[in-house]
Amino acid sequence: NAGVTQTPKFRILKIGQSMTLQCTQDMNHNYMYWYRQDPGMGLKLIYYSVGAGITDKGEVPNGYNVSRSTTEDFPLRLELAAPSQTSVYFCASSAGGAENTEAFFGQGTRLTVV
Amino acid sequence: GENVEQHPSTLSVQEGDSAVIKCTYSDSASNYFPWYKQELGKRPQLIIDIRSNVGEKKDQRIAVTLNKTAKHFSLHITETQPEDSAVYFCAAGGNAGNMLTFGGGTRLMVKP
């Protein structure tokens, strides 16, 4: 199993540009998450999904959109990039269900908006 | 929603000493409390977790304790080694959507 795979690893965007961060997992997990981690700070939840076709906002959703058309993929879309979106983005997945289980993280995408 | 507070934000110890990191949570419905270690430039990885039906769990030099009444849980690392230097995150889950809410992190530095 590859686990959780994110692409790209690094990206520089100009203000106002758009991009999609890709995330795929091969563990057949129902739950998927997007977090952002600002320098020296903790993890903030952007969006999450409890299954294909279902998404919901987390703590900091403004400026982002997600979709979950398949169990495996959970892309994060940035529209009109702003310097405040400079951060490291982590995708994660977990089996979820009646009992919480370990969340597995991707390797992260370091995004700089200039 | 859930709110998780983590202290201290930085912790410096001498190699061989113990380190303790504490977290408090607000949602009494939370029932899953994992701890993640994040080395510089890498992804967070689970090191230990505890569920609300137990009060303590140990794994070699690492232990976690949980006090559900007081809504706090702690990570204990004994005989610290330089490779324990990293950022540690606590988290709480069990609320709607099984989301994990993370604490702000603790940067642990173990001096040789």
Image (cartoon, coloured by chain):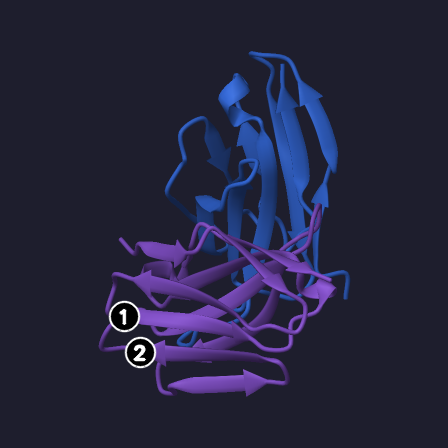
Chain colours: A blue, B purple
Secondary structure under badge 1?
loop
Number of labels in the image equals 2
Q: Is residue A89 above or below residue B84?
A: above
Quadrant the N terminus of chain A occupies: bottom right
A42 or B18: nearer the viewer: B18
Residue at 57% of width from left, 26% of height from top? A86
For the question of whether residue A71 can be seen, the reply is no
Q: CA distance from mark 1 to mark 2?
A: 6 Å
For the question of whether residue B13 can be seen, the reply is yes
Relative placement, left or right, of A74 versus B42 is left
Crowding at dot 1, Cα within 10 Å, few <14 / some 14-19 / many 20+, comes out as some
- Residue indicated by mark 2: B67
Circles 1, 2 touching at the beta carbon (< 8 Å) = yes
User: The numbered mark 1 sits on a residue in which chain?
Assistant: B
Image spot of residue A52 (x, y percent): 51, 54
Image spot of residue B10 (x, y percent): 51, 51
Image spot of residue B80 (x, y percent): 65, 71
Secondary structure under badge 2?
strand
- Residue indicated by mark 1: B71
A107 or B47: nearer the viewer: B47
Residue at 73% of width from left, 32% of height from top? A10
